[in-house]
Amino acid sequence: MPLLPKSRKARRRLLVVAVAAPILALAVGLTLFAMRDAVVFFYGPSQAQTEHVPSGRLVRIGGLVQTGSVIKGANGEVRFAITDNVNTISTHYRGELPDLFREGQGVVAQGAFDDAGVFQAREILAKHDEKYMPKEVVDALKKSGQWRAGAASSRGAGA
Amino acid sequence: MARGRRVFEGRGRMIAELGAFALMLALALSMGQTALSAAGRLRHSALLQGAGEGAALGAFIAVLIAFLALMDAFIRSDFSVANVANNSTTTEPMFYKVTGVWGSHEGSVLLWNLVLTGFGALIVLFGDNLPRALKALTVMVQGLLAVLFIGYTVFASSPFARLANPPVQGNPLNPILQDPTFAIHPPFLYCGYVGFSVVFSLAVAALIEGRVDAAWARWVRPWALTAWSFLTVGIMLGSFWSYYTQGWGGWWFWDPVENASFMPWLAGAALLHSAIVTEKRGTLVGWTVFLALIAFTLSMLGTFLVRSGVLTSVHAFAVDPTRGTILLTIVAAAVGAAFALFAWRASKLSGGGLFSPVSREGALVLNNLFLSTACATVLLGTLYPLIRQALTPNNPISVGPPFFALTFNPLMIITLLIVPFGPLLAWKRGDLRAAAMSLRIPAALALACGLVALAVMQPRMALSCAGLALGFWLIFGALAELAERSRVGRVAAMESLRRLGGLPRGAWGTTLAHAGLGVFVLGACFESSWKLENAQTLSPGQTMSIGAYSLKLDSVTPIDGAGYSAEHAVISASRNGNPICTLSPERRTYPAAAGQTTSKKSICVLGASDLYVGLDDGQQNPDDIHAWVVRAYWYPWARFIFIGPVLMALGGLISLSDRRLRFSMPQRAKAKGGPLKTEPAE
């Protein structure tokens, strides 16, 4: 068989490649597929409104929790607005709020818009540090021209 | 009294300066360690090499003094030290004052240095049977790493910086972090991360020498095992903390911070297995060296990528971007140099023998292919948002569980399916049919368990039941290896028992680690498929239900605790009218932390499952009766998620205690050699 290399060593090496190739191909295929469908886009409130995020698509919304907007309902339901001080997004969440969730502070919520345009959050991302402001929130605020430097401190916490 | 107090403060002042000085001394000693060891190797001088080793021991002692000095400042609440003032208060319990040492960035980098020089000292102390030249070079590389990181600490991140006007009271450690599990999580994690530095140094030394032999691989294994076991426990503690204090209903989020610790774990697991092949069969040499470099690279990358603030994470730390850049530069320099060396010298390493695809080594190669591919997908998923942001800055994305469910999980499922075959195949030429024959009972049992779950569990989820079957397959498969080795059923019971007792510890270690993996899969699968959640507003006297349990809010009373005040609820849980346990969640307010509140969960452990209750804000309802939102969760088999990794780490430690694997005496086992002793170590 001229197709196979003559030396035993080369044949073994070919075998390793033959086994490795499909595994790598599988991994690459899965990754490409997942990158198309399984990544979550991030929007600031203004951006989410101008870009018309389709309802039902899993996205992250980041901004500040509007002061005075948090209404706690019965059975642990909560409504609040995420704002960049230009646009606001009314958000509904049923679940435990992180301990550092406060009015006027940065927040990132993951969920999807319903047909009425209310953001149904499934997860409110928690933080370790009360002074921490998610980078995306800073960028979103900068984009809407509402960022004040110095609002977020840079002290480290946690390990 | 006033006078005595002043004297006391004066002494304290000196202690912090002593710490700063000790750190600089450690930097100098590490430089000496590097230079003397290199000179010792070049001139084949035992004297210079010995001096280098002495410097390595000295560097460890110096960092230890610095560390103790910082701890002393924390214990005495010396707020003239900026780090202490920023991260602790006088009202904290002593335990958190001590653990506050590594609660800050500066402190945790100091801990990193302590572990790094500590492992350097261990190489010196336990490295007597390493070839002299290799030992000198390993100590040298370890010294070089210490220079980089201690240098960073001294010049960019000193924990001993003073405040001109010390405050009366400090900033508290964030209340969420005041938890025993979380307090001991960083030391374990760092022992794991930095443990891989030894393997890294050994690999670089071998590349410089241009020689890797079985002795080298035998040396790599115990260190890799140690680091990997620590890392396993460290990750588990972090996960457990997130699970039981945070009430996010989760123990793993595929968040960048978590991935950062998981990647070195995967690379370490691959390394453990490939080092066996290198030791026993003398092949896969280049690959093992590569993995040794990669494991520590990923440890550094993970730690500092997270700390540099370039990645957004749910566990995010606010950090100084300049420092992050310095750290990433250090990492890039160390890693770049190591891999350049690898590219240059790897071809020098003798490749080695042939092997049949169906053999122990063949199975281990397959294991490595899958583990490293899985590790690569995790790396890609972690870095992809960063790459994408660089290309299209307008649309930031995050990569979360859905991505990893599609990429990592399928690869891992295939890996887990083949795990039980590995130990049953012989070296050189395995018999797949015989292995399959000995695995037919475990396979049948696992399948039966899966089918029972399918019939019993509501709601019915076929995939989850398949996952459970996979977990049982791992456990029974691991036991099958013991059964096979002790010839249960084929020889007399006493003879089986005797054989079982005579098995090398390495075999027990493998079995335990693989079974632990199965236990973890069972827990992960069960918990994520059948967990329940319910939240209801309750006034005292009212009840709510979760699954088969009903919860009655008996009372809510205000109490005072250490550093906080709280609303303390008493909730009694019952099932079908039979009382089960009393839960007492709290809503704690920390006056020192700007009135921050945390929810202290209460957990009723029912076998391997958890009934888990938290108390939310109190509310005045329209009838003017006080009411509280009570959140209840049912996490079935959740304990297995954490018991599994503990078993895996124990497996690692048992393997470590195997006579043939001990740091100092790998040669002796051969001399004794009984019929069982000739079996290879796992």
Image (cartoon, grey):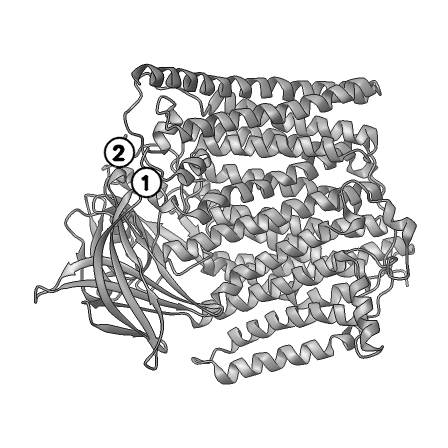
3D distance between C-alphas at marks 2 and 1: 9 Å
Position of B469 with respect to B664 (left or right) is left
The number of callouts visible is: 2
Can you give x and y, in whole percent of width and height, for residue B352 in the image? 86, 47
The residue that disc 1 covers is A133
Can you give x and y, in whole percent of width and height, for residue A7 in the image? 91, 54
Position of B528 with respect to B133 (left or right) is left
Can you give x and y, in whole percent of width and height, for residue B112 in the image? 55, 34
Q: Residues within 10 Å of mark 1 (few under 14, many from 20)?
A: many
User: Against B114, is B485 above or below?
Assistant: below
Can you give x and y, in whole percent of width and height, for residue B342 in the image? 73, 36
**Residue A35 visible within the image:** yes
Helix, strand or loop under label 2: loop
Q: Which mark is residue B466?
A: none
User: Residue furthest toward the left?
Assistant: B623
Position of B358 with respect to B645 (left or right) is right
Identify the image quadrant of residue B286.
top right
User: Against B383, is B604 above or below?
Assistant: below
Tag 2 near tag 1, CB within 8 Å = yes
Helix, strand or loop under label 1: loop
The residue that disc 2 covers is A151
Q: Earlier in the sequence, mark 2 or mark 1?
A: 1
User: Against B335, is B280 above or below?
Assistant: below
Circle 1 chain: A
As shown in the figure, which amino acid type bears the numbered disc 1? Met
As shown in the figure, which amino acid type bears the numbered disc 2? Ala
Seen from the viewer's position, the closer of residues A51 and A55 is: A55
Q: In which quadrant will I find the N terminus of chain B?
A: top left
**Residue A117 visible within the image:** no
